[in-house]
Image (cartoon, rainbow, N blue to C red):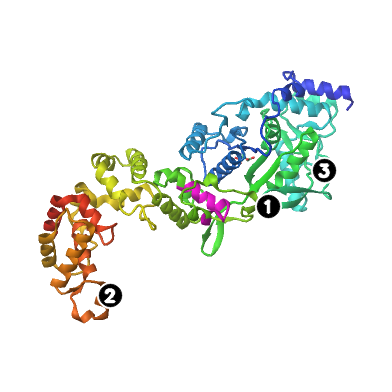
Amino acid sequence: MTDIERNSLAELLFPNITATREEIESKYPERTLTEGAKVTRFAPSPTGFMHVGNLESAFLDYIFAKQSNGVFYLRLEDTDQERYVEGASSLVKESLETFSIIPTEGAFAGGAYGPYIQSERKEIYQTYIKDLIKQGLAYPCFMTKEELQEIREGQELRKEAIGIYGHYAVDRDLSLEEIKAHLEKNDDYVIRIRSNGDLNKQVVLHDLIKGDITLPENIIDEVIMKKDGLPTYHFAHVIDDHLMHTTVVIRGDEWIPSYPKHLQFCQMLGFKMWKYAHYAPLTKKENGNTRKLSKRKDPEFSVSYYKEAGIPSEGVKLFLSTIINTNFEEWYLQNPDKSYLDFPFSFKKMPTGGTLFDTEKLNNICRTYFSRLKAQTIYEDSLKYYEEYDPDFFQVMTKNKDRLISFLDIERSGKRPRKDIATYNDVKLESLYMFDEYFYKDKEDTYKEISRNVDTDILTKYMAIYDENDTNDEWYTKIQNLAIENNYAPSTKEYKANPENYKGHIGDICEQVRHAITGKKETPNLYNILKILGKEEVTRRIQFFIS
Ligand code: GLU
């Protein structure tokens, strides 16, 4: 085709596109940022499901932008209208809000580089496509589904590269007249890039996480515009990240094979390319094999799981931090006053292969997280959780605010703070016995953990000496005396030396009191619990137990 024919083809296909590339570019000026600032974007397709891999992606975008004083923006990639699900963008918004991973620019926040929803950018993509047509770098392809299918089957049979290239690209050189004839018949068409790639040549992706990866050049005449006029992911990605001035594209490593296409598009469009960081998928061990996390098999794959399960969003982010950089965990344990944002995250230290999603580790890091919070904060955060998920306990919490906070405050300071709480659910599970509403509710349940013979005599004697105003030391000395008077060893050490001389040791007395008062084998410091419950309640429970 001559220049004139290509121009008329471009007008024929895109009569409504009047803007020029230059006009569009002028609306997207370079960003004014400090040296080294990263511009990242979270670019989900609103499909109605957010998985923990998406969350990891958003978290990476967030921390790398934040730590470099850059920009983290949100773009909704909704060009695949068949996959579009009503309400899916609200799910993206809510999920990001739940985890406080808030983009400062983009689909919900607005900004100077929008629109940030791809379906609203149709004219922009078409302007570039029109320009490629004029240059002879793209062309309309009228091949039918059946023709494409037949080619594919032949290629599979002959073990050739799959796609439209070389002699398979039959519409590459249609004349203007032939194209007009198709258009007059209203034949469906897509726009393909006229690939200049050579299968024998290679390109190198300098990946920030995985290092250099060599890949064959793209030889396929890739579809850049679908028959509905919207671009494919590949084309929209290149246009948007160019115009929005992304500096690092952080995305899942399933996109690595597409890199040669993206590079080729950039070159054809004359764009300077950004950097890429491709992260490995989250995996799980199953019957000795490693597999990717799955929507069907793993509830924890869904982002909505965490909120419902009462797992704090900060805990999830700490866990993701351990996945992102393996040296994070040690740092976190050594820096009790710091936030993950103080940690020097680096792409270089990210795992290059699949990363194990270890729920035990998630649990542990959440325990550490809770162990560093003030009792008041745990109270307030869990109150929000119970308001939504357990109105009964919410009432109890509200009614017994001071009691619960005092309980949560036991053994909170000091070198080894208690670690009995990993989720908001644990706040209830660990504190139930502090509330009469629950303590007396299922009488059998309350004491079901008690499996040894009970010395009711010692409990009666204990009540006789119990004074709620005793200090911790006074309290302990009294129990020691009680032990000696009743043939219990005053220390475990003494008991171990001559077990035959004693009925038991001081620990057994404490244990019996604990059983009677709480119905549990293990609790935080008993003295504090007695103090919080108060004399009246302690007496009532011991009598209840004896009877
Ligand atoms: N919309 C793509 C996806 O959800 C985004 C990939 C990318 O970040 O470029 O998989």
Q: Amino acid at mark 1?
A: Lys
Give the residues in magenta: 315-330
Q: Which mark is residue 197?
A: 3
Marks 3 and 1 sit apart, C-alpha to C-alpha, by 24 Å
Which residue appears at 54% of the width and 28% of the height? 109
Q: Residue 353 occupies which quadrant of the picture?
A: bottom right
Residue visible at 58% across and 44% down in the picture: 60
User: Which residue is found at the position 83% from the left and 21% from the top?
Assistant: 8
Residue 454 visible in the shown view? no
Write down the quadrant of residue 228 in the picture. top right
Element type at marker 3? loop
Q: Quadrant of the N terminus?
A: top right
In this view, the mark in front (2 or 3): 2
Circles 2, 1 touching at the beta carbon (< 8 Å): no
Image: 225 above or below 155: above
Q: Which quadrant would the C terminus be assigned to in this image?
A: bottom left
The image position of residue 393, as x and y in percent, is: 27, 43
Residue 475 placed where, x, y %?
19, 60
| Quadrant field for ligand 1 | top right
Label whose residue precedes the other's in the sequence (2 or 3): 3
Q: Nearer the viewer, mark 3 or mark 1?
A: 1
Residue tagged 2: 493
Whole-percent x and y of residue 99? 48, 40
